[in-house]
Image (cartoon, grey):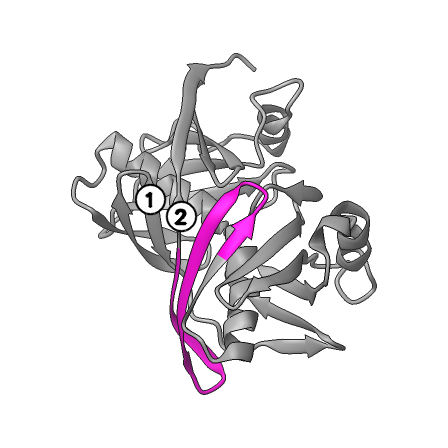
Amino acid sequence: MKFYKYQGTGNDFIMLDNRSGEWNNLSTAAITKLCDRRFGIGADGLIKINAAENIDFEVDYYNSDGSKSFCGNGARCSVAFAHFLGIFNDSKTVFTAIDGIHEAEITEDIVKLKMSDVKTISKDGNDSVLNTGSPHYIKYVNDIADVNVFEDGKAIRYSENYNKEGINVNFVEEISDEQIFVRTYERGVEDETYSCGTGVTAAALTYLDKNSAQEIAVKTLGGDLKVYAEKNGESFENIWLEGPAKQVFSGEIKF
């Protein structure tokens, strides 16, 4: 298998050019093995770039346990990979993913991705729940460095309310009026990741909602992102996630 490795603020992915359909039948066991950091390539997820009709390409994303979802950083890395492959040659593209159609723009290593609209932000006690392509739980904290993201995130993810479908759990600290810090426990990876694009977007929307703003810088363990959005009633529209997406290496693997 010829593969490429990409990372977006430390969220890392195995990228496969599957436009010929060569890897259509890749099994869950194979995906899990390829993503294993000791016995495979190692990654938070695996992405197939598929051919698509009347659109540039399809992003077919799998978590490291083989489950499917939408991934914001994975989609941004997919845009960078598709541009590298020459699927589109200018700065703008349109592609499809599990949650629908997306637009994106690329300038060197920076990819700006248009996310799906968010209809509502629900409450769970003092915390928030919303879907930004994947479901997210948002909990604000005072000192994010002291949070045990693995234990506390896992407890919420496997709690009675969320155990069946699973949920990503984000801990958020307000650094200033212009920046928040987000740490995320990701379902499907079942651990803290260095960054989560849909989680960053979800956390940012709760901040923008609370502060009546339209953009916010977001710090993660793996780097810096920005989120832009417009509120329309209870909904958020014109949501964009912006940050770096870089090719790390390429190679071949027997499995």
> How far from the left and from the top, in percent, is residue 24?
44, 33
> If you read the primary sequence from the N terminus, does the residue marked by circle 2 or circle 1 appear first?
1
Q: Amino acid at mark 1?
A: Ile
Decide if residue 77 is on the left or right side of residue 20: right
Few, some or many C-alpha atoms within 10 Å of disc 2 (few <14, some 14-19, many ≥20)? many
Q: Is residue 159 magenta?
A: no
The residue range painted magenta reads 218-241
Give the alpha-carbon distance from disc 2 to disc 1, as whole Å. Answer: 5 Å
Q: Are marks 2 and 1 in contact (CB under 8 Å)?
A: yes
* Quadrant in the picture for residue 229: bottom left
Q: Nearer the viewer, residue 94 or 154?
A: 154
Which residue is painted at 68% across and 78% down in the image?
Answer: 123
Does residue 196 appear anywhere in the picture? no
Q: Residue flagged by tag 2: what amino acid is it?
A: Gly
Q: Main secondary structure of the magenta part?
A: strand
Residue ID for mark 2: 243
User: Residue 188 versus residue 138: which sits nearer the camera?
Assistant: 138
Q: Position of residue 42 (x, y in %)?
A: 59, 25
User: Farthest residue toward the left?
Assistant: 90
- Specify whether residue 240 is painted magenta: yes
Residue 147 placement, left or right of 182: right
The label shown at residue 118 is none
The residue identified by callout 1 is 110
The image position of residue 235, as x and y in percent, is 46, 80
**In the shown orientation, is residue 59 left or right of residue 89?**
right
State the SS at label 2: strand
Residue placed at 39% from the left, 73% from the top? 237
Q: Is 1 above or below relative to 156?
A: above
Say if residue 152 shows up in the picture: yes
* Residue 186 picture location, percent across and down: 65, 48
